Amino acid sequence: MTKKEKKEMVGYRQQPGKISFSRPGSGGKSPFSEARDEEMIPESQGGKKEQPWGDHKHDKLITGRIVGKPTSLVDSKWKVTGRAKYGDDIRLPNELIGKIVRSPHHYARVLSIDLSKALELPGVVSIATGDDASNKFGVLPVTKDEHAMAVERVRHIGDLVACVAAEDEATALEAVRLINVEYEVLESIHDMKDGLKDSKDPIHDRGEYHIGEANVQKRVFQEFGNIESMQENAVVSHKNNWFFNGVNHAATEPHAVVADWDPSGRLTLYTPQQVPHYVHRALADVLEIPMHQINVHRTFVGGGFGGKSDPFPHEMCASILARKSGRPVRITFDREEVYWINRGRHPSHIEMNLHADKQGRLCGIETDALIDGGAFASFGHVTTYYNGVLHTAPYEIGAFHYTGARVWTNKPASGAMRGHGAVNSRCAVEVGIDDLSEKLQVDPISFRLANLLPPNSATITGFRVTSIGMRECLERVMKESGWKDKFRKMPLGHGIGIGCGFFISGSGLPIHWDPNKFPHATVHLKIDMDGGVTVHTGAADIGQGSDTVVAQSVAEVLGLPLDMIRIKSRETDTSPVDLGSYSSRVTFMNANAAISAAMKIREDLLNATSEITDAPVEKLVIGDRRIFRKDDPAVGVSYLESLHKAQEERGALVASGAYRTPPMGRAHKGAAAGLAPAYSFSAYVAEVKVDVETGQTKVEKVWAAHDCGKALNPLAVKGQIIGSCHMGMGQVLSEEMRYGRTGNLMNTDLLDYKIPSIHEMPEVTPIIVESNDPEGPFGAKEAGEGPLLPILPAVCNAVYDAIGVRSNELPITPDRLYRDIEKKCRELKIDDPTDLPSPRLEISELQDILEKRADQHSIRDRERRLKSDIKPYHNGALFGMDPTIPPDEVDESWRVTVIPSKEYLEKPRLAGSAWLHTERRKRGE
Amino acid sequence: MKMPPFKLHMPTSIDEAIEIAKQMHSKEEEFDWVAGGTDLLPNYKWHLNSKKNVISLAKISQLTELSKTHIGAMVRLQDLADSELTHPVLAKSANSIASIMIRRSGTVGGNICLDTRCYWYNQTEDWRESIEWCHKCDCGTGADCRVIPNQNTLCVATYQADLAPVLMCMGARVHLISISGKREMLLNDFFELDGMKKNKLLPGELLTHITIPKETLQWEGDYQKLRQRESWDFPEAGVAVLWKKEGEKLKQLRVATTGLESIPGYHEDISSELVKDWNGNESIKILSEQIRKAVKPVQNTWYTPSYRRKMVKVLTKRACKGLLGE
């Protein structure tokens, strides 16, 4: 070819064969793909990984690379190098600083707001009040009761009244001081018991749905099972009146937000949110603009724990100020403001009654829970149900009676916090079982093992339970803690205790739509020539590792290293709608959606490979960046070759996957609360040392077994278990939101809000139990909230084992425990607490019966988890009912009731007394 | 949390510091001394009695001298705890203060002159506004005490520092300097029963160092402390016990307490009475009970007053354990 000819060849269209394209590599940093690790390939696929819990629908997707390996989180390097941008790290040019005027009164009518002096202050750019946004919002569509800023009245100290945007923080603070608000102070309510009574000025008005003239926000009455015979069959009973102080999430990062209206008139809100979608909706409501004009940008989240899952008034304030001033506005909370916004665990009065019959069966649970909602509804509607329905399982029980009420008081609003609604009543029931076992003179672990529901069963409230690893959790902690040599055998001051947990793995019903009309989670994938996979998801990584789990799921299905997966989960502009990070739903729902999207890409790749190699698709498997014949691994192509083939006609591959829950549950009012596609189970043993002379409790060791179905990332699961222990330890021993004589919250700072320090932290042995959930992604269930539940009762029960004293108020601070120790000493006529007797256990004949029953159940459970053609099992079989039909459908003595009877109302329990009121619409006024 | 602006002065000698103080005095400008800043600056962030001027002692090397008998005001708490020259009981109490990060910054002088603390006082400005302020920081309103209402003379905020009780038992003397010259006194005489006045320091006066009599360096003893967490928390109660034995015979016994009232308590009257007919365990029992009776905590810290009093008894008993020679 002459030089001239070469020149002439330069043209728009290159001719095939003239210039050779280099063959695509395999993709990824290493040019060579690694062999499949047969130890990670399930037996059902011909690999070596044993499957004692049976096979799984996702087995065929296992490429043996990623899932199940301890993996550092994909964003961890951003965090440890300080590159991660949290809420307050967002700096936009020309920003203003926003500050909030807050109420100094518990409850007051706002008469007037004088802005004149503040407006005159140089540097003040805009000011907003309740008049700027009159629309209500709230996290649950049924209870929207919040405003951006006070409209007519303020409902707690720290409630928002107005907000200011200024050139700098000092000016904004000065302007806040110059705003003069005139209030008419109203009579405030602090004791939640007062909330049950009629009031002159209820904190909210629910119109025709208002319950009496009281401050009852929500009430629940439920009866299941054989209520009548519960007490007559009982040979022992337990009763305890608990008080649980409120606790706050105390996330490291205080709330912060930046709002920016861009030149095209769209709002971008930068916020460390757990649930960007709900803020998205609320902003549209409050600002009266369509959702498509808003982009919610989730920043890195410095801890959520439920405290960042509501749409918040300060997010509205920043947006309003930014709209008014035409400049970005940043609001960052002081720690004190975090307590004003709260949404922590409800302070609760819980009466727990348990009954056991002579065969050592739990023939009844009666629970009455009065919970203090503070000034707003938040998630409280759900919390009221959760306090009841989440503590029946994992046990098979004869009857369940629940009354619950949530009242408004003039305190910062309670809401959802890790273990939402389940933590306090779980503690009460597990401590009750310890007491019942003692009265029956049996080992409390044996008692539990003989009363567990089997896999693939229905609880007394009609929840469909699929996989259960409860038995294994109990057996593992019993063995590893040396339980049998320690329980009721250690000297005074040394104790060991057991507690169990049960938690939803995602809420079955989305709160904003019919689950049949729109999925719970959607994930989009996009792959272009470079082979990297862009994943669009709305799941909010709040530090729990949701980005990582989605990346892992996609990488596993496509046989790619993690560095080829790019997670885009920050912006509602690009991510599909997702319900966010709460109710422990993300791994279950979002990873399932990701798998289903990845399966579509996988199919494209297999088809393309089949075209290249002529191998039938059924014979092809995916390994590390290579697709090949299973029966002749030499025949195959690299990932990139296959990808480029698949792209020939379409360019970039895109796929969408979604997850929705299957139909489940029963039909009674409130049946949906607590429904979940799967449930996690856990059992912890805690070993403590109690100083009887001071009441100080030190947790020394915890053995923590959690059934998460399948640990997609064992490192993250262990982190969740240890972190849950720390958080639960706080609630059980030292953390409380303490309200003083005047109703003021006394400890709005991290010196006086006592989070356990490293010195208080015990040695935790995390034990992962994998029960292989049939519907979970690769068998996985939640591990973020359930692990918190058992630590509280385990510690309470260990304290009893150590000194023979049962507390009924959390946290068990030394002064409270010492008060109980003194009481015990007086009862026993002992002067010196070091002379207290250490509890001992004389085993009764029932122990043998329980052990035999547990053995039989163990066999039953194994069959039920491995066989595919099992019959239904409804709670009640243990009491002689036909397991295949819900007992209430065949036996009149078993029932489902949601309205209290006249007889009950003659002598209601505390929360139950909320039913003495009549709703306005039913009063015929 | 925004600190109010102040002018920071950084003298490099005591003389210079006093000179600055003198100028402030003549201009009638208020100021605070700042040593490690771990007490003052959080209070400033909360806008608690903040001043327009702050004189830092950080650059004055004369104040960091440390020997067995001389402890400079600017000796860092962790250095005191780590030094081989420090009496073991003093080292123990120093090592129990707050957390290691605070001990590396906080100083001996700062700890002795620690501001008193109260649930109704150590709060943000917004918070205090919601209770219409309090006696200790009334913002010009003449507000009442919120702990014990209807008394408007004394402040009952609690003194929660760890070093003072041990140093009191050691018979330490504090050395002060001001524009009117130097003076010194027993640490036992230094405190003044009022949560606002706290001690005998005059406006503009500075604590330069502490001296410890040689004699007590040989004494034995213990310091016991009550708190919720083993780090960070201020003492809810603290008991120091020091004694001198000759052979098996107890010659002298001193007890001091902290974290219970607006000043530390020195209880030598109780202990010296008991030394005369010392009878081991029996005497310890009586001593603990009498110390319990001698202290009068109020409801303004994490634990209840009744619990704190009961625990003083336990702490005293435990601090005396070494006396039993077991």
Image: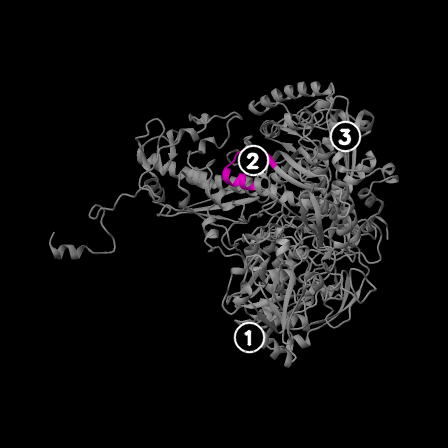
Instruction: Kindly state the secondary structure of the residue where label 1 is placed.
Output: helix
Residue B284 in percent (x, y) is at 75, 44
Q: CA distance from mark 1 to mark 3?
A: 79 Å
- Judged left or right of residue A234, residue A278 is left
Three-letter amino acid code at disc 2? Thr
Q: Magenta region: which residues?
A: A701-720
Dot 1 amino acid type: Glu
The reply to whether the magenta stretch includes residue A573 is no
Say if B295 sits above or below A726 in the image.
below
| Residue at 30% from the left image edge and 31% from the top image edge | A635
Which residue corresponds to mark 1? B16
The chain letter under disc 2 is A
Is residue B274 depicted above or below A618 in this figure?
below
Task: Tell me: B95 left or right of A550.
Answer: right
How far apart are the two marked residues, 3 and 2, measured between alpha carbons?
A: 33 Å
How far is mark 2 from mark 1, CA to CA?
A: 59 Å
Mark 3: amino acid: Gly
Chain designation of label 1 = B
Tag 2 secondary structure:
strand
Position of residue A347 measured from the top left corner of the image (x, y, whole percent): 73, 48
Q: Is residue A43 visible?
A: yes
Q: Which residue was labeled with disc 2?
A: A765
Q: Label 3: which residue?
A: A364
Quadrant of the image containing the N terminus of chain B: bottom right
Q: Residue at x 72, y 71 (%)?
A: B139
Judged from the image, the secondary structure of the residue bearing numbered disc 3 is strand
At 55% from the left and 49% from the top, the residue drawn is A542
Most extreme residue toward the bottom is: B27
Label 3: chain? A
Write the residue at 54% across / 45% down: A544
Residue A75 shows up from this direction: no
Q: Closest to the observer: B32 or A429?
A: B32
